[in-house]
Amino acid sequence: MAVRGLPEQHKRPAIYAGIGLGAVLRIGLALIAIEILRYPIVSFLGALALIWICWGIAKDLLKKDTHEDTLPSTGNLLDAILKIVIADLSMSIDNVIGVAGAAEGHPVILTVGLAFSVLVMAVGAELIAKLLDRHPWLGWGALVLIANIAIQLLWHSVPELMNYFI
């Protein structure tokens, strides 16, 4: 959805750059995932990042719905890459935990597992971008899904955070 407003020639570079940067960051986070995930603030901050992404996507979808045929493509490549990286990091915690658990402390297995998941995402992301161009209503469904994930993260992290302050 982040590449939906970009010109066609910028979509593929944005997807690959966003996923590539997300992969590098994901591998780094996976190496320290066990320590980070002890703190509910990580889930809380991930939820806030997802809410920020939802806000931006909703604005883009509303703009596309009201001016779809009258406006030229005005998407910003760097903005799309940033959205992809943040969304990838925010929503990949389960993936990182799963691969980190399966790797059982072996950094090579961890890196190979995460690289494979990035490859799967890169192929899927391009197909999804094409589907969203053909069927814009799918963007609203994805927005609801992302918002649901953010709400679940908040629902589980806020009570744990309150325990620290009460």
Image (cartoon, rainbow, N blue to C red):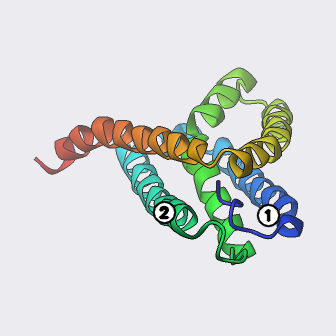
Is 62 or 154 nearer to us in this picture?
62
Task: Residue at 46% x, 58% y: name it.
Answer: 49
Q: Which of marks 1 and 2 is nearer the N terminus?
A: 1
165 relative position to 67: left or right: left
Q: Quadrant of residue 83?
A: bottom right
Q: Is residue 103 above or below residue 35?
A: above
Query: What amino acid type should be assigned to the residue bearing mark 1?
Result: Ala
Label 1 environment density (alpha carbons within 10 Å; few <14, some 14–19, many ≥20): many
The residue that disc 2 covers is 62
Task: Residue at 79% x, 38% y: name it.
Answer: 124
90 relative position to 39: left or right: right
Q: In which quarter of the image is residue 76?
A: bottom right
Q: What element does badge 2 sit on?
A: helix
Q: Residue 14 carries which label?
A: 1
Residue 129: percent from left, percent from top: 75, 49
Q: What element does badge 1 sit on?
A: helix
Q: Is residue 130 above or below residue 107?
A: below
Q: Closer to the observer: label 1 or label 2?
A: 2
51 relative position to 18: left or right: left
